[in-house]
Image (tube, grey):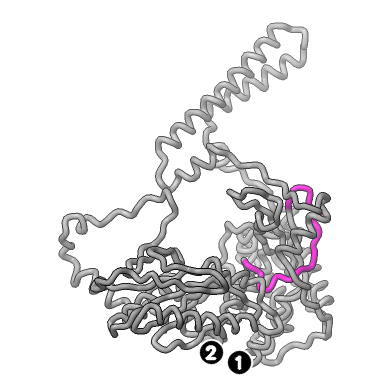
């Protein structure tokens, strides 16, 4: 495998012939994994309770068992084998109890969830029971129609020409893509973890590069890499499980496909910034713009408007099924209109069409079925494609701001009264809803939340002015959670930790009220100094 070099694809290939070339050569590589790679490596973590005493007892038990089997009528040998067996298994139970007691005694807040998982055990998988779908084939189709609705996009099998403006794939791009991938991610249908591809690239760096370079040159994503596994999991706490909405699907993609997707994600990120495909007020899925940047920008905007003596209100919205509703032709049209390189547009169109998925549950057919998935969630490039797709929804608001973090939107308006703010938010929501309908993106109205921001100098009682959206009434919240942060109307923000997590300890200088002498200026000044650099421009 070290010296293996796949032959180049034939001239003027079609997507199917290119897929045959790719799957054939990829299969030659992965077949070597099955021959020379152990499925499981026994380590000290396999049985941490094992000891040399148990090894000696097992050896004595096996020796006496073989001795008793040679003469089954020797009562003494049979009794000796039974005694050795009893001593061996009792020692195992005692070792397990001792190890479990030691584990609990030394448990930390970081390992308490592991202890709970080991104590409770794994619950058996729930078999979906849907009305009118008693047989596995009908059940499989009903679940596919719910999770992947709509007709799958047509796959065109035309002659491919190499793009002249395509930059050849560099070998170091493959290395950077593998370096940023986690070795712990669950693999898809190929059953090959990222750790294997990292080792392959270390010993034969030309191998992966030679397989991916033609795909980039022709702007094509092969059908072999578009297959995914969908693991069906039940949502806990549901009253009944007779509806597909009581389950969720975790889609697992092929790890080799994620290498190419990471490379194209890096390329498109640079192109999107240069071509103006991203709105300055978009965060998430972009390097250097995290949830804390979004919260900082919102807080800064609200405080700036409050300093001007205006009343500020914010409406928090969530796009419903955003990733699944992305239209591939519309997205490719947006890329072309902004002058994105044709080979990138061609690869994006190929990546989003012709996808198939097989659902995995007890009794499932385990066959790949074509489906419409929009931008597949879990892909390294899907979030960026979605952010580009919804960039048109962000609009300028006089004395306000439209802010988004992937599929979470925040509409901020200001005026002289909160009731006027409600009217402004209703108008902005109607405009946003109309724009979203043209893109096929709707909003999950029941998840909407309203906040009327206040200052510490406000002496009036909190405004109770509600907002009416699509027949639903939303009253202002006294506290809400958004992007992992808890908000109050007075703009007190704190990170939200899951229940049971230990609270962070305060530094010792905070408990006695005096900072250490090393501080050149107080922490508040440091925060104010860093604030402009943490806000997206």
Per the rendered image, the range of residues in magenta is 361-377
Query: Residue 145: where, in percent of width, then height?
Result: 76, 64
The residue labelled by disc 2 is 276
Q: Is residue 229 left or right of residue 288?
A: right
Query: Residue 206: where, in percent of width, then height?
Result: 67, 72
Query: Residue 159: where, in percent of width, then height?
Result: 83, 85
Examine the rendering and report whether any part of residue 249 can be seen. yes
Residue at 72% in and 14% down: 68
Q: Nearer the viewer, residue 3 or 91?
A: 91
Question: For the stretch drawn in magenta, what is the main secondary structure?
Answer: loop
User: In 3D space, how far apart are the residues under numbered discs 1 and 2 (Cα atoms)?
Assistant: 8 Å
Q: Could you tell which of marks 1 and 2 lies nearer the N-terminus?
A: 2
Label 1 sits on a secondary structure element that is loop
Q: Nearer the viewer, residue 405 or 206?
A: 405
Mark 2 is surrounded, within 10 Å at the Cα level, by few (under 14), some (14 to 19) or many (20 or more) other residues, namely few
What label sits on residue 338 in the rendered view?
Answer: 1
Residue at 50% in and 80% down: 426
């Amino acid at each position: 495998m070290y010296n293996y070099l796949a032959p180049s694809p034939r001239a003027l290939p079609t997507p199917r012939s290119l897929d045959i070339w790719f799957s054939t050569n990829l299969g030659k590589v992965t077949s070597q994994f099955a021959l020379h790679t152990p499925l499981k490596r026994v380590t000290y973590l396999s049985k941490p309770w094992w000891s040399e005493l148990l090894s000696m007892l097992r050896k004595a038990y096996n020796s006496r068992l073989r001795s008793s089997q040679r003469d089954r009528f020797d009562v003494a040998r049979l009794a000796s084998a039974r005694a050795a067996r009893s001593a061996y298994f009792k020692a195992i139970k005692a070792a397990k109890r001792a190890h479990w007691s030691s584990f609990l005694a030394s448990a930390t807040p970081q390992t308490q969830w592991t202890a709970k998982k080991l104590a409770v055990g794994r619950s058996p998988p729930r078999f979906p029971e849907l009305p009118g779908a008693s047989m596995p084939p009908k059940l499989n189709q009903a679940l596919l129609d719910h999770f992947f609705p709509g007709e799958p996009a047509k796959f065109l099998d035309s002659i491919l020409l190499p793009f002249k403006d395509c930059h050849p794939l560099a070998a170091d791009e493959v290395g950077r893509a593998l370096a940023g991938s986690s070795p712990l991610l669950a693999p898809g249908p190929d059953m090959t973890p990222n750790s294997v591809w990292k080792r392959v690239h270390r010993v034969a760096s030309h191998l992966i590069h030679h397989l991916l370079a033609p795909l980039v040159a022709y702007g094509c994503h092969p059908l072999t890499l578009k297959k995914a596994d969908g693991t069906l999991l039940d949502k806990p706490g549901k009253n009944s499980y007779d509806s597909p909405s009581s389950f969720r699907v975790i889609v697992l993609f092929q790890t080799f496909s994620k290498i190419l997707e990471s490379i194209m994600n890096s390329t498109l990120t640079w192109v999107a910034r240069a071509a103006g495909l991203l709105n300055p007020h978009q965060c998430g899925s972009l390097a250097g713009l995290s949830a804390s940047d979004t919260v900082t920008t919102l807080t800064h905007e609200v405080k700036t408007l409050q300093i001007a003596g205006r009343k500020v209100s914010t409406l928090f919205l969530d796009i419903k099924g955003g990733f699944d509703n992305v239209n591939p032709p519309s997205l490719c049209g947006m890329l072309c209109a902004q002058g994105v390189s044709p080979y990138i547009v061609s690869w994006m169109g190929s990546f989003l069409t012709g996808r198939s998925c097989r659902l995995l549950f007890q009794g499932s057919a385990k066959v790949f079925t074509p489906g419409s998935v929009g931008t597949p969630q879990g892909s390294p490039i899907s979030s960026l494609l979605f952010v580009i797709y919804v960039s048109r929804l962000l609009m300028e608001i006089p004395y306000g701001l439209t802010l988004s973090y992937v599929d979470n939107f925040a509409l901020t308006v200001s005026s002289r009264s909160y009731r006027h703010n409600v009217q402004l938010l209703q108008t902005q929501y109607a405009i946003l809803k109309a724009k979203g309908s043209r893109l096929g993106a709707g909003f999950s109205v029941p998840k909407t939340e309203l906040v009327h921001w206040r200052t510490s100098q406000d002496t009036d009682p909190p405004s109770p002015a509600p907002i009416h959206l699509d027949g639903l009434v939303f009253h202002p919240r006294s506290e809400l959670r958004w992007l992992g942060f808890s908000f109050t109307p007075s703009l007190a923000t704190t990170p939200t930790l899951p229940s049971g997590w230990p609270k962070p300890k305060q530094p010792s200088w905070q408990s006695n009220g005096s900072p250490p002498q090393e501080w050149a200026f107080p922490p508040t000044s440091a925060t104010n100094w860093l604030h402009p650099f943490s806000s997206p421009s």
